[in-house]
């Protein structure tokens, strides 16, 4: 399906750590260097357009589960893993596991889209459904992964690491705890020969100062998931030594507060970030670490994934979300600026929205429901004598 080209006038376009500058933005499904023929001109004067967020860590099929823990605080996430695994055949987990894979993945993708995260790293098997054309977000395709030193054998970890091309990121949950076992995991991983320029450490709460000093110059990055860490462990990783190698990951709702924006606010509450506006570099940093040349910016050739936020860093305050040059959801006034898009009424966390009819149709077809999202019934198609009325 062809995408209506757009010429966006008067907006400030975020351009990485240099900030935002007023310029015209030309798009089809990608950002263009000049206006396309037949483009629709849209005046967004005064608004700031941000590139689609990159969520560096999620388990997309787990976002329909309730946030769960069975102790006040864990010394190590491995303990939590054993606790949850022992309850998978009890309710509500038994029923929630029975939903079709597509529905479970779709809810994870939708959660991300609704907060402006249009590109996601899935830390689990690369299900083919993740790359269907109707999946709500883009999912990193070129990656390797292992779960952890606790739930994988040494042989499995080494095999996965060696099988991953060196140009691809390789992800592993590491040092997700505050005990001695967590503190020793980096040295264990390094002894296996799995610490290198493509290694991405997820969590890293229990890394010692010495191991952080050793790892930060070597590995590709640290994925920071503060709300999961604080919920399970009572503290999160120290991110200052990692500098520009820090990436935000939302984790799944099984342990996290919610979405990428919740993690940004969690970072502020942990007193490791200044106000969110001072950390906008997190919008662009993950692209290089993940090998993405067409995300994290809005220069020519980038994916036309962008969003406009309101006054607050919460999803119901987002004014507009665009994926592939096509507005997906926004305030009624903002969506009305794109008359070529058929929309239906919706509400997100009680705030009125308009949502693209195709996305609304997929939401209605999903057996699972996104918390806080209400979408009106779809307009009926009328037929008479086999012809549309």
Image: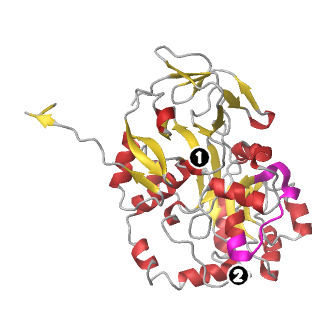
Is 299 displayed left or right of 194 in the figure?
left
Find residue 28 and report its horizontal and vertical position in percent. 51, 26
Reading the image, the residue beneath label 2 is 73
Is 30 displayed left or right of 189 in the figure?
left
Q: Is residue 158 visible?
A: no
Residue displayed at 35% across by 48% down: 376
Q: Which residues are magenta?
A: 230-246
Q: Is residue 240 visible?
A: yes
In the image shown, does 352 or 292 lie closer to the viewer?
A: 352
Reading the image, the residue beneath label 1 is 317
Report the residue that reaches farthest toward the left.
385
Find residue 185 and report its horizontal and vertical position in percent. 78, 74
Find residue 303 and report its horizontal and vertical position in percent. 58, 34
Q: Is residue 238 magenta?
A: yes
Find residue 323 and report its horizontal and vertical position in percent. 52, 38
Q: Count residues near mark 2 (Cα–Cα under 10 Å), then give few for <14, some for 14-19, many for 20+.
A: some
296 up-or-down from 33: above or below: below
161 up-or-down from 351: above or below: below
SS at circle 1: helix
Residue displayed at 85% across by 51% down: 243
Quarter-of-image position of residue 180: bottom right
Residue 290: numbered disc = none
């Amino acid at each position: 399906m062809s995408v209506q080209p757009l010429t966006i006038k008067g907006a400030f376009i975020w351009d990485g750590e240099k900030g935002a500058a007023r310029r015209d933005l030309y798009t089809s499904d990608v950002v263009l260097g000049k206006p396309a023929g037949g483009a629709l001109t849209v005046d967004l004067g005064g608004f700031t357009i941000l590139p689609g967020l990159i969520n560096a860590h999620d388990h997309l099929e787990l976002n329909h589960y309730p946030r769960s823990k069975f102790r006040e605080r864990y010394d190590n996430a491995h303990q939590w893993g054993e606790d949850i695994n022992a309850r998978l055949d009890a309710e509500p987990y038994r029923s929630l596991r029975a939903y079709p894979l597509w529905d479970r993945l779709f809810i994870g993708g939708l959660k991300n889209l609704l907060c402006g995260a249009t590109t996601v790293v899935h830390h689990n098997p690369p299900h083919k459904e993740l790359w269907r054309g109707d999946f709500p977000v883009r999912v990193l395709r070129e990656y390797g992964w292992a779960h952890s030193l606790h739930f994988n054998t040494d042989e499995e970890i080494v095999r996965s690491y060696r099988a991953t091309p060196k140009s691809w990121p390789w992800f592993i949950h590491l040092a997700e705890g505050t005990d001695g076992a967590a503190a020793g995991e980096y040295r264990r991983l390094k002894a296996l020969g799995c610490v290198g320029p493509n290694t991405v450490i997820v969590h890293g709460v229990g890394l010692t100062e010495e191991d952080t000093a050793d790892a930060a110059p070597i590995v590709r990055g640290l994925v920071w998931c503060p709300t999961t860490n604080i919920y399970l462990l009572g503290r999160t990783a120290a991110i200052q030594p990692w500098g520009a190698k820090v990436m935000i990951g939302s984790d799944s709702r099984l342990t996290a507060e919610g979405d990428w924006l919740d993690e940004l606010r969690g970072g502020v509450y942990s007193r490791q970030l200044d106000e969110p506006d001072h950390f906008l570099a997190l919008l662009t940093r993950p692209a290089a670490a993940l090998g993405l040349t067409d995300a994290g910016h809005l220069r020519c050739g980038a994916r036309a994934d962008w969003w406009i936020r309101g006054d607050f860093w919460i999803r119901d305050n987002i004014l507009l979300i665009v994926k592939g040059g096509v507005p997906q959801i926004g305030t009624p006034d903002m969506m009305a600026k794109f008359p070529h898009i058929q929309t239906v009424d919706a509400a997100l966390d009680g705030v009125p929205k308009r949502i693209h009819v195709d996305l609304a149709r997929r939401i209605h077809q999903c057996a699972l429901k996104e918390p806080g999202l209400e979408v009106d019934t779809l307009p009926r198609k009328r037929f008479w004598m086999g012809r549309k009325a």
